[in-house]
């Protein structure tokens, strides 16, 4: 299918860290101003945000099937956002991505993520989810976006802790099946010129660096298989979330700015003891209320020339979402770094050429 020539390609978008943006999944509701795209876009702009990350489950903010087929519809969506003073940063298929791979133990719980007529039909639900991701690739292309957010789903999560001992080959077979389902989707994103960014997240088969590396190998290091970097999920697993950037920066194409804290005690640790979020040692917090070193994160992303949006994802067990959103834009703005175009000691530089350098090294003229 040939898209109309008015589509903006990722190469047209200016490089560098952009923001602040806000993920709307935790704010959307039936009540104004969170009920329509126009209203929530105006609200986001009033809070100081420049970009909005759109969830695509349902049709409240975007009709994914229509966006995949109609350039004029996508232009209308962009115009609504522009009139409010924001732009669409990325689309999200977190819920649909989850349904690409569901272990039977979670069938009933995850049925609520699917349209009602597909509930109780795991195979049909999976086919629908795969189609949703393919639609998202084309919709992202029509909107001129360069990255897309999703979950990987999970076939192996019930076997995360090896007791009883996992049978030989189980993990390899699980990742082979995961790759089989995702490869056709990744190829669609390649055709659209959009990176498919998996949020590294407990509950998903891609929940840390090691599991992402397994997946990457299984999909033959597909160029569109990328990472949505959210340091909160790494902190709660007690990972080196700064070293993660050093190791995987070439695959990090999206960034959720979300805070968290981990306060181990004598009763529970990483697994949380089945407690609610307030009582758990590991808790998500509003920006600035947790333990994440965002100054270092923004510095590292700038160091590695990260080109994408800094997007607030509000999840906090204590602070109200309205307060978290109101504080979030200014927090992100304070941490944004404009990459320097010159070295700090350029003022003391001297003119040089190869002959001059050879003299400094005590070498004869060539």
Image: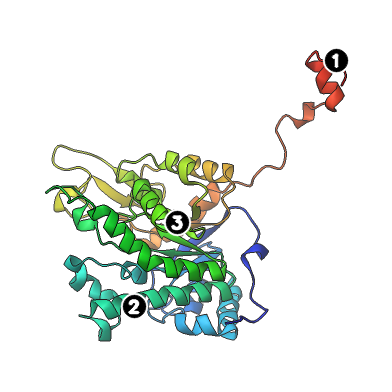
Q: Quadrant of the C terminus?
A: top right
Q: Residue furthest front?
A: 169
Drawn side of residue 239 relative to residue 242, left or right? left
The residue mark sitting in front, 2 or 3, is 3
Label 3: which secondary element: loop
Q: Position of residue 140 (x, y in %)?
A: 53, 72
- Crowd around label 3: few <14 · some 14–19 · many ≥20 (10 Å): few
Can residue 18 be seen at all in this image of the molecule?
yes
Q: Is residue 88 visible?
A: no
CA distance separating discs 2 and 3: 23 Å
Is residue 190 rendered to the left or right of residue 134? Answer: right
- Residue at numbered disc 1: 364
- Provide the residue designation for mark 2: 127
Categorize mark 2 by other alpha carbons within 10 Å: few (<14), some (14-19), many (20+).
few
Q: Secondary structure at mark 1?
A: loop
* Image-quadrant location for residue 76: bottom right
Which residue is the site of mark 3? Answer: 220
Residue 174 position in % (x across, y down): 27, 59
> Is disc 2 placed on a helix, strand or loop?
helix
Q: Are marks 2 and 1 in contact (CB under 8 Å)?
A: no
Residue 86's mark?
none
Query: In the image, is 271 to the left or to the right of 37?
Result: left
Q: Earlier in the sequence, mark 2 or mark 3?
A: 2
* Quadrant in which the N terminus is drawn: bottom right
Q: Residue at x 36, y 42 (%)?
A: 291
């Amino acid at each position: 299918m040939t898209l109309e020539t008015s589509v903006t390609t990722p190469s047209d978008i200016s490089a560098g860290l952009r923001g602040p943006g806000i993920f709307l999944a935790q704010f959307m509701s039936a009540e104004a101003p969170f009920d329509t795209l126009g209203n929530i876009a105006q609200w986001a702009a009033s809070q100081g945000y420049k970009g909005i990350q759109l969830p695509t489950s349902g049709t409240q903010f975007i009709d994914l099937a229509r966006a995949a087929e109609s350039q004029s519809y996508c232009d209308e969506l962009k115009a609504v956002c522009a009139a409010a003073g924001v732009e669409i940063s990325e689309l999200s298929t977190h819920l649909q991505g989850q349904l690409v791979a569901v272990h039977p133990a979670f069938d009933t719980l995850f049925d609520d993520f699917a349209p009602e007529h597909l509930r109780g039909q795991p195979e049909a639900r999976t086919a629908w989810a795969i189609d949703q991701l393919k639609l998202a690739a084309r919709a992202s292309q029509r909107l001129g976006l360069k990255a897309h957010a999703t979950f990987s789903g999970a076939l192996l999560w019930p076997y995360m802790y090896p007791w009883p001992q996992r049978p030989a080959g189980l993990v390899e077979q699980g990742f082979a099946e995961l790759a089989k389902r995702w490869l056709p989707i990744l190829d669609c994103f390649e055709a659209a010129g959009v990176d498919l960014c998996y949020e590294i997240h407990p509950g998903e088969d891609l929940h840390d660096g090691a599991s992402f590396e397994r997946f990457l190998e299984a999909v033959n290091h597909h160029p569109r298989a990328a990472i949505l970097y959210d340091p909160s999920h790494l902190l709660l697993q007690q990972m080196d979330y700064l070293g993660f950037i050093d190791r995987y920066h070439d695959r990090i194409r999206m960034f959720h700015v979300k805070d968290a804290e981990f306060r181990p005690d004598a009763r529970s640790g990483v697994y949380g003891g089945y407690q609610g979020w307030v009582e758990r040692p590991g808790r998500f917090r509003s920006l600035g209320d947790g333990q994440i070193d965002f100054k270092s994160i923004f510095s590292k992303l700038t160091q590695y020339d990260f080109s994408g949006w800094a997007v607030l994802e509000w999840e906090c067990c204590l602070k109200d979402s309205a307060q978290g959103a109101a504080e979030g834009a200014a927090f992100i703005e304070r941490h944004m770094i404009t990459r320097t175009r010159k070295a700090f000691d350029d003022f003391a530089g001297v003119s040089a050429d190869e002959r001059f350098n050879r003299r400094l090294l005590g070498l004869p003229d060539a």
